[in-house]
Each structure stands twice: as structure tokens, then as C-alpha cells.
Image (cartoon, rainbow, N blue to C red):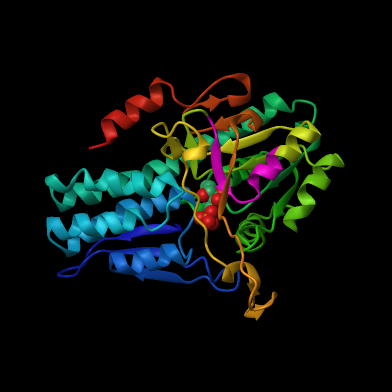
Amino acid sequence: MRTIDWTPADAGGNAVIALIDQTLLPGELKVLQIHTVDQLIDAIHRLAVRGAPALGIAGAMGAALAFQNGDDHTARAEAQRLRDARPTAVNLAWGVDQAVARFADGLDAVIETALQIRDDDVLSSHAMASRGLELLQELLPDKIESGLNLLTICNTGALAAVERGTALAVIEEVFLQGHLRNVVACETRPLFQGARLTAWELDKMGAPHQTIVDSAANFLMARGEIDAVLVGADRITANGDAANKIGTFSLALGAQFAGIPFLVVAPESTIDVHTATGSSITIEDRGTDEVVVINGRRMSPVATTSINPAFDVTPAELITAIVTEKRVIRPSAGQFPSDAIVTERLATARP
Ligand code: MRU
């Protein structure tokens, strides 16, 4: 089943977005029917839909909902509110912009664009999966036959996209081709996307896996128990810096210390060539409660507040390679995302 999809209008009705409510997993698999931009923004704020590629599709489909439900002026204002719902993943704004660029061509064209982004995402996931496996075969020729121990953070699987995902799609491919020994999924505090969502997906795949507290990761790497780290990204800047779930930067440092590959797997739509370096990325802070309240119980004194950045930025020099659906970029070897292929794509896609 798809994480997010478009349900066409039935006779006389309006189309809706159907998406899995990720806040309820792994306990309950429930599909939300999204009729309005307000409902979609609420789902994005609550992380009912989350993960950079899924946010890109939500953005495009949400702009289509806005256009379906209102006049051009109102729809543009709604699309802007949707664009601003979360600041870090570039895919959300990118998806909205792609759909808004077709407003002048009418509703069918806007919907067609949103569905194309959905379909492209599926193809991208498959391409990243096979390219990522090929890269691991190149980087770890001696280890791959006996089975790889891979570590990941957050959720970069089907739940973060339409199907399959990014880094977890590579891990799934490694598993399907018989090269996986074990996956270590960082629990991903404060919202447990690793322990809840990645573990759920790995369990459904039948892949061997364990979850750990985030702070155990570098120790496992230093002890030689991990062969490579694979993560997703929310925004990759022109110089190859990558924003991803908080904790990713420290994994990259741990990988460097242990001398193992650190791979970022993301679609081209996550590359933001208009932002020069990671220091210019807006990092969402999600407030105190997510950190100090666990299962309804407050863990800290009432007066204690938190710093809660949802993402961090891994400097390009710590990234062995970025794998997209089109190419492998090696920032630590002097290659950068800001080359002709990306510039051309954005030049034709932006209004
Ligand atoms: O806050 P989230 O759950 O939306 O954060 C998601 C991540 O950090 C993912 O790693 C990233 O979006 C890549 S998803 C393929």
C-alpha cells in the first residue's frame, strides 16, 4: 500500500488525499482522508505524514486540493501556507511550487503534475536502491559476500516516500539480494521514527534488525560492529552539506572515526542548489514537550525547557557519497551536487 496517494473525485464529489497516519504506527495502521489544506497542514505539523519525499508529494497534492477547492487567488494563498508548514525539507516547497506552476493550465494539469511527482518518486526509489547496492559492492567488496551490518537513523523507507524510500530502500535491496547480515536502527529521539517506523518496515520485510538508543551508535561503530551508515536527507546544499534528522551529524563523525562509509541517499528533489551551504538552512525547532514528555509522563521539572532541533547539518567533507536516482556524488572526494544536471532540472521546473 502507498504511504500517500490521490483518490480521484467520484461523481459530483471532490478528490481527496489518502495518507497513512504515521503517529499511530506500529500499533495501528490507519489511513487519513485529507479534504482540505488545513487538514493537510495539521497532518504535516503532527508528523502524520513526514519524510522529505513524502512531504514533496504532499505539497504537490495539497496545492492541487487548494486549486480544486478555491479560486486562483485563494489557492495561491493556501499553497503558500502549505509551503511554510515545515521549513527544513526542501521537497515540501519544491512539490508545492511544481503544482502551482501549472495553475494557469487548469485543474487537470495541476493534478497531472502531482501524480507525475508521485510516480517519479516510485521510480526514483527503485533507482536509488540499485545504485546504492552497487556502491556498497564497490566500497565494501570484501565484506559484502559475508553480509553487511548497516546502521541507519530516523525513517527513510516507504513511509517517508510513496513506496520503498531512500536509504532504507538501499538496505531493502541489500537484503533482497542476500547481502544483509543485520540492520541497526537508531531509535531517533524524541519521536522514535527509528524504533517505531523503521523497525516496523524492517519487521514487515523480514529483515534482521535491532534498535538502539541513539547514543550507542558511535560506540558500536568504534567496536567494529557496523560496516556502513546509510541516512536520508531533508536538504542538500550546493556544496554537498546535508540536513537530516538530529543525530545524523554525530553518526558521520562516528563513521569517520571508525573508518567506514557514510552514505546519504536522497532524490534529486532534495538537492537545493540555490542554497550555498548548510549554515543557511532553516532548522525546525519543535519545542519542549516532545523532549520532556514521554507517553504522557513529564520526565523533567515543570520549569525545565528544551532545545529541540529536529535536524542537524552534516558537513560535506564527512559524506563519503550522496546517492540519487541519477548519480553518485562524492563530496569527500571533491565532487559537488551543483553541477549541470541539477541546474538544468531546476531551471525548467521553477516558475
Ligand atoms: O521529522 P521527520 O520524521 O520528517 O524527519 C525525516 C528525516 O529526517 C528523514 O531522514 C529524511 O526526511 C529523509 S526521508 C527519506
Above or below, 343 relative to 100: above
Q: Nearer the viewer, residue 43 or 303?
A: 303
- Taking the magenta stretch, the answer to whether it contains residue 148 is no
User: Is the C terminus in the top left, top right, bottom left or bottom right quadrant?
Assistant: top left
Q: Residue at x 35, y 44 (%)?
A: 94
Q: Is residue 43 left or right of residue 278?
A: left
Q: Is residue 154 left or right of residue 64?
A: right
Q: Which residues are magenta?
A: 240-252
Q: Nearer the viewer, residue 128 or 260?
A: 260
Above or below, 297 relative to 147: below
Q: Residue 76's x, y, as percent?
A: 20, 54
Q: Is residue 229 left or right of residue 146?
A: left
- Taking the magenta stretch, the answer to whether it contains residue 247 is yes
Q: Residue 48's x, y, as percent?
A: 47, 65
Q: Is residue 20 visible?
A: no
Q: Residue at x 75, y 25 (%)?
A: 141
Q: Nearer the viewer, residue 145 or 297?
A: 297
Q: Residue at x 58, y 68 (%)?
A: 288
